[in-house]
């Protein structure tokens, strides 16, 4: 979906990196053990890809070139990567985000808030100046955007260095800008943990022209992706039927979540089929109400009204309904 246009927010990129998760903080305040909590503060598929077929060698041996090539081939097929673009697997998209600002000399980067704050933090750490609007040496497009689900257009990829973060785009593959991956100085990022629900595996991808991928590869070093991640990632990316069925399930659950929250007094502000952003009268009060039932949600330091929720697993819907 194309979300409502978000209102602008001033975000200091040097501020604390705020993320979903953080159950330790929730438990310290509201009690309970980790197993007592339903964590809806992230945008991770609650029904992960079924892991199977791991061998002792996946754990005991250094990954070989064949395993790496099989993962790259699976990724190229799944995302329809242009022939002129190369693919670099890495230990999570965050590892790539931290290194991308070093691809060129520092300057000004355009990052339109609200959005995923690791991009601004990474550019700031490398000495870049972050601005919200206007011509810049680099531009970051989180597509669809986190947290409001904004969909960017091809014309928005207009900076000398453009980073298109498609970490949540696997729920809307027809919106992907992957066809731009073979354009000069354009980097497409993909996250494995969100759609396949295996965030702990730490697997992400950079897709760009060979010269950019070669430089990123030099930064990440050898054997950056574990043997288990190579095998599981290859299996999952080759399983197109699972992906199709999962998109249908996520869309159905998203509609269910919207109906539940809107009937409870919230209004939809955007999101994707992996997380939803709602406007409420006071987000911290809603978060506290849910936390009393050991359900953790996401609020934002720059908004008093934004509440973000992920999708619960099937057996926890009734629990969420009771809490609301």
Image: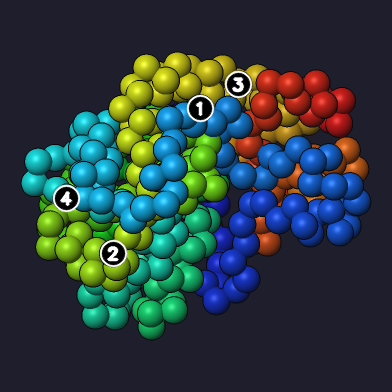
- Lower position in the chain sequence, tag 3 or tag 1: 1
Q: Which residue is mark 4?
A: 86
Please name the residue shown 36% across and 31% down the image: 235
Residue nearest the observer in this picture, 248 or 222:
222
Q: Can you tell which quarter of the image residue 125 is in?
A: bottom left
Q: Which residue is mark 1?
A: 50
- Lower position in the chain sequence, tag 3 or tag 2: 2
Q: Which residue is mark 3?
A: 253
In percent of width and height, residue 116 lies at 50, 56
Q: Secondary structure at mark 3?
A: helix
- Lower position in the chain sequence, tag 1 or tag 2: 1
Question: Residue 222, labelled with which disc?
Answer: 2
Q: Can you tell which quarter of the image residue 263 is in?
A: top right
Q: Is residue 178 above or below residue 215?
A: above
What's the distance in space between the residues labelled 3 and 2, CA to CA? 40 Å
- Lower position in the chain sequence, tag 4 or tag 3: 4
Q: Are marks 1 and 2 in contact (CB under 8 Å)?
A: no
Q: Are marks 3 and 2 in contact (CB under 8 Å)?
A: no
């Amino acid at each position: 979906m194309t979300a409502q246009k978000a209102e602008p927010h001033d975000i200091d990129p040097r501020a604390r990196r705020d993320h979903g998760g953080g159950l330790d903080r929730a438990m310290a305040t509201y009690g309970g053990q980790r197993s007592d909590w339903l964590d809806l503060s992230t945008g991770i598929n609650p029904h992960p890809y079924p892991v199977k077929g791991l061998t002792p060698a996946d754990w005991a041996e250094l990954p070989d070139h064949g395993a790496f090539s099989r993962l790259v081939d699976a990724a190229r097929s799944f995302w329809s990567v242009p022939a002129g673009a190369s693919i670099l697997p890495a230990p999570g998209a965050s590892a790539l985000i931290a290194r991308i600002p070093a691809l060129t000399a520092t300057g000004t980067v355009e990052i339109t808030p609200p959005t995923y704050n690791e991009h601004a933090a990474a550019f700031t750490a490398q000495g870049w100046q972050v601005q919200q609007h206007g011509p810049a040496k680099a531009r970051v497009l989180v597509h669809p955007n986190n947290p409001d689900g904004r969909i960017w257009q091809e014309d928005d990829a207009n900076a000398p260095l453009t980073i298109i973060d498609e970490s949540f785009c696997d729920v809307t593959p027809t919106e992907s800008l992957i066809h731009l991956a073979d354009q000069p100085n354009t980097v497409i990022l993909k996250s494995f943990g969100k759609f396949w629900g295996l965030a702990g595996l730490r697997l992400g991808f950079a897709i760009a022209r060979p010269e950019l991928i070669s430089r990123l590869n030099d930064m990440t070093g050898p054997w950056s992706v574990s043997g288990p991640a190579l095998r599981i990632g290859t299996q999952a990316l080759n399983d197109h039927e699972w992906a199709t069925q999962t998109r249908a399930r996520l869309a159905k659950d998203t509609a269910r979540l919207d109906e539940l929250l809107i009937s409870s007094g919230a209004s939809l502000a955007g999101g994707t089929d992996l997380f939803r952003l709602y406007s409420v009268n006071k987000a911290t009060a809603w978060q506290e109400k849910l936390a009393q039932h050991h359900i953790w949600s996401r609020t934002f330091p720059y908004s008093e009204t934004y509440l973000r929720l992920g999708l619960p697993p099937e057996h926890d819907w009734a629990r969420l309904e009771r809490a609301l």
